[in-house]
Image (cartoon, rainbow, N blue to C red):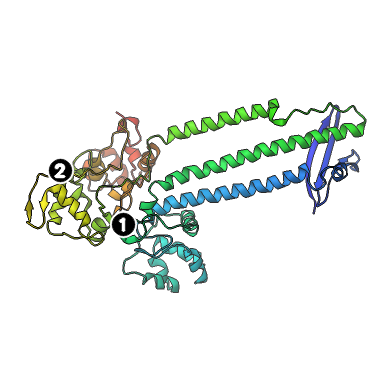
Amino acid sequence: MCIKMFSNIVSKQNFYPITFGISRCDAIFARQNFDNSMTNVHCWSQDLANKKPRYSILSLAFAAILLLFSSISFAQDAAAIAEGKALFKANCAACHNPLQNTTGPALKGTLERWEAAGEYKGKSGKQWLHEWIHNWNTPVKAGFPYAEKMSNWSPMQMTMFPTLKDEEIDKILLYVDNSETKPAGGAAGDGKTAQAADAGAAKEDASKAPGAAVYLFVVFLVVLVAILAAVTKKLNRIVAEKKGEPLPAEDNTPFWKSRKFLATVIILGIVYVGYHLVDGAIHLGRQQGYQPTQPIKFSHQLHAGKHKIECQYCHSTAATGKHSNIPSVNTCMNCHKNVQQGPEFGKTEIAKIYAAAGWDPDQGKYVSDPKPIEWVRIHNLPEHVYFNHAQHVNAGKVACQTCHGPVEEMREVYQYSPLSMGWCINCHRQTEVQFASNNYYSTYEKIHEELKSKKLDKVTVEKIGGTECQKCHY
């Protein structure tokens, strides 16, 4: 096996194309003459016969290149796993654990099981799995046997995810297949699912993994530059020796003390510091995935999901004011005067509500002054940003889940969206305004006329000024 690479060496007025190759035992260098004949210049193994015949700079370079590409591949996998973890946390963790059955089955090995089910109607098991995640009814109605089997796993219907892209699904599957340790908190019954145990970790991992890839790439670039510099120096000496020219004086200065190396280190240091300064400034104040521990283990999955309690029953000011309120303890007592025991924690957590309300369940009356429950706020925007809940809920007809994610599936709420400026602007660019039967937009006569005349197919928030600076920063 011989791997050929090409390098051009210019010496004074002459141009010498040098071809060198790596074999198992040696590296042979040849010079291409102007008549296309080849002149042997040097046999590397002969030169190093009395030194280290088993190792050469070129073989080290070859090994370094292989290690570089394998390291980049590993770093890319790590980044994909971290992104899959964030996607899993946002979409799946409320019902699934990679390693154990909860509301849904354990997900590790899912791809392998679906692929083992074989092809059906021209589609592979993986393609049917993608269809299942987008809309589980599709493979069931198509008669795919494994899908029919999984549809009977639980009486609860799986949430549909039509907006998930295939590559995002693949990253989720990569993450669950690489899950090796159980989440802290043990069984699902204690209210600690994977999403609770890994609070904020997905965001941290997602930011670290790409950084690791960059660092590995830079390190190997430096190594390759050093190796190639040594090879070039050696080739120059070989050409000079064959031509009978005086050899340049040997420079025994260690490479780490050379000016070129120091300049390279300084430049890389400036790039490293600059990257982290910019990255830190971009992410300043963002807390996607933030999931603080709350004073009471309140399950939105139980209340909003199972019992179908409307969001605005508790968060009553979302439709009437700028802020969406945290419900008072009196709101909790509307139900919990009668509901004195929960399905997961028994009387323990409900007793905390009674303590805050000053309620004695045995006497059936209030025995002390109430005090507020100190809930920890999750969603925060910078002070210079104006956001009005009522405008989005009433005029925009925006569902709570658009910004807050599938809250009805969360046992413990976390910040689902980044709530960054770019995220908001993209939403305004893509979201279609509901003009029909919406009196808030009755004054936009020109747009209504263009819609009737088919000049416009739809109206986005951007069309009515939703990306203007003063809308949010006045």
Q: Which numbered dot is residue 272? A: none
Q: In the image, what residue occupies the spot 83% across and 46% down?
A: 53
Residue 347 image point, x, y percent: 20, 58
| Quadrant where the N terminus is found in the figure | bottom right
Q: Earlier in the sequence, mark 1 or mark 2?
A: 1
Circle 2 SS class: loop
Q: Which residue is mark 2?
A: 371
Q: In the image, what residue occupies the spot 65% across and 45% down?
A: 68
| Quadrant where the C terminus is found in the figure | top left
Snapshot quadrant of residue 231:
top right
The furthest residue to the right: 244
Real-space Cα distance between discs 1 and 2?
Answer: 25 Å
Residue 72 image point, x, y percent: 60, 47
Residue 257 lies, with reference to residue 309, above or below; the image says: above
Within 10 Å of the Cα at label 1, are there few (<14), some (14-19), or many (20+) other Cα atoms? some
Snapshot quadrant of residue 249:
top right
Instruction: Answer yes or no: is residue 144 visible.
Output: no
Identify which amino acid the numbered label 1 is placed on: Gly
Identify which amino acid the numbered label 2 is placed on: Lys
Q: Nearer the viewer, residue 262 or 384?
A: 262
Q: Nearer the viewer, residue 380 or 148?
A: 380
Count every numbered label the image shows and give the total: 2
Residue 320 lies, with reference to residue 107, above or below; the image says: above
Residue 451 image point, x, y percent: 31, 45
Circle 1 SS class: loop
Report the side of 218 relative to 304 (left or right). right
Within 10 Å of the Cα at label 2, are there few (<14), some (14-19), or many (20+) other Cα atoms? few
| Tag 1 and tag 2, C-beta contact below 8 Å | no
Q: Which residue is mark 1?
A: 191
Residue 198 image point, x, y percent: 40, 50
Q: Nearer the viewer, residue 198 or 421?
A: 198
Snapshot quadrant of residue 286:
top left
